[in-house]
Amino acid sequence: MTTLQEESPETGTRSEASVATSLHDYKCSTSSTATSATCLTSDEKDKPPLQITHLLPPEKLDQKPSRQFRHVIFTVYRRLFTVVIMANVIGLFFIDVRHRDNISNIKVISSAASANLFVAVAMRQDYIINFLCEIFVATPKSTPLRIRRILTKVFEFGGVHSSAAVCSLAWFIRLAIHLTICFENGHLRNIPVLTLAYVLLLLFAGIVIFAHPKIRSKTHNTFERMHRFGGWLCSMTFWTLIVLTAKTISEAPDSEHSVSYILICLPSFWLLSLNTIHSFIPWLRLRKLEATPERLSDHALRLHLKANIADFYTIRISDSPLSEWHSFACFVDAKPRNGSTNSVVISRAGDWTAKTIAEPKPYYWTRGLPTRGVLYMSLIFRSVVLVTTGSGIGPCLNLLAMDAVTRPFVRVLWSAPKPLETFGEEIVRNVRAADPAAVIWDTKKFGRPDMAALAWQLLIESQAEAVFVISNPRVTKMVVYALESRGIAAYGPIFDS
């Protein structure tokens, strides 16, 4: 019986020779499994597709307080968040210890606010996300597993985005306070400047508040509109504030420079220029895609798109560009329809998806560049277990459709209500082609499974290097935590990935 090799305390990796040996043994066994799968008796078909023979270890690797801190409280996302916060605290210290005149302080504080805003916006740009993913996925498979495990966390870059946005808000508060002091002592007595500073502060505070995970999940449409329209208003307000401030400074009795000279010497001017360009770039790639809907069931719809998108990309689609946008993993059409090149699978999960499934349109809008998804990072591993539920099988089809020589060895655990009836024969056949012994769990027939226990079972059997979970947030967090806290490399999309 194959057993899972424990991580070495010194290297954090399992024996790669043992992984290769167990993979060879397992591949030899799957052919007989696949052959016998078509010869099941009626009694055997009524049994769950996988029996648990390897129980989750009752004892985890570290004590509960430490485990909770590492895997729940101080995640990679929050570590990145903390790094940005600390960098800003250090910057604040150096600004405060240096004595400057009031006008110089306004320039420095506005530059700090602009710099954080630039980082927050830049970390959400499609080309930067794709660049980071391409750099990290180029890691050779010969690299120690401990290093590859760390690099795969690249998709938690959202910690930098959100932290920089919060820090930018803090600097805007500092700027508003400083402008108020300058107004009181007469160094910069300009009512429009002071008013715009507080308008900007309120707008930006609204964006940050609605971006909080709990508020965002409850009022997603409001969050999205606040981010878009509030962001545009912030940009226009900030531009007006910078120009008015430069004009006021140039009109001071002791000023020796023109408005244009003051502007080009302000870092805020150039940083805000870059942010403005970034806000336009995605809309320059606004496109209308022809769509051929394929109703899989009352619960799921497959849209065949003329998009010409490669594997492992996610696209944003909308039926109303100024309204809500939704991201879906895009996979290549094995059987094109009406000249389609790619497909997305949409399952009922809210008002928009319900409306789309009931009344699909012949076209949808997309904007920006397609972005790399979490599963793209699976390519740096030799073997993986895919754990997915419902329409989460859509993103997995990119990996499953790859040539077996170039992709990692894959085991699949897919839980869904009536998978064949809900998602169609073609998708089920594609899953079976990649993993003849795939565990396709019908929740209508066998009930909801213990996904963590089944994932552990497949991990033991295949000796995979990592587990990727594509599911709803609750299942993703549960399975990832259950495996990570037992020393397994487990990954899944987070709310801000």
Image: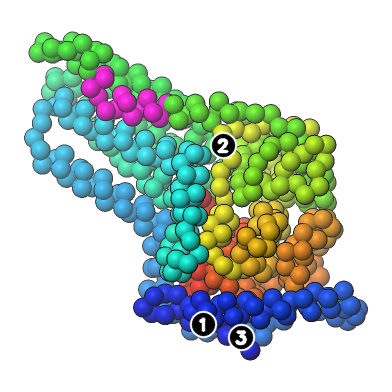
Tell me which residue sits at (56%, 60%) in the image.
378
Query: As drawn, which residue projects farthest toward the right?
Result: 42
Tag of residue 5? 1
Color encoding of the figure: rainbow
- Judging by the rendered image, the residue that carries numbered circle 2 is 369
> Gap between marks 2 and 3, in whole Å?
44 Å
Q: Is residue 431 above or below residue 339?
A: below
**Amino acid under label 3?**
Thr
Q: Kindly identify the residue that appears in the image at 16 percent across and 45 percent down.
A: 93
Residue nearest the viewer, comparing 230 with 264 = 264
Mark identifier at residue 2: 3
- Crowding at dot 2, Cα within 10 Å, few <14 / some 14-19 / many 20+, comes out as some
Residue 430 showing in the rendered view? yes
Could you tell whether 222 is left or right of 433 in the image?
A: left
Q: Residues within 10 Å of mark 1 (few under 14, many from 20)?
A: some
Magenta stretch, residue numbers: 263-276
Residue 168 is at least partly visible in this image? no
Q: Residue pushed farthest bottom? A: 1
Image: 156 above or below 17: above
Quote the CA–CA distance across marks 2 and 1. Answer: 41 Å
Query: Could you say where residue 68 lies in the image, as x and y percent from the top left?
Result: 42, 70
C-beta proximity under 8 Å, tags 3 and 1: no
Residue type, label 2 = Leu
Q: Position of residue 417 (x, y in %)?
A: 77, 62
- Quadrant of the rendering where the N terminus is positioned: bottom right
Would residue 183 be found to the left or right of residue 220 on screen? left
Residue 289 drawn in magenta: no
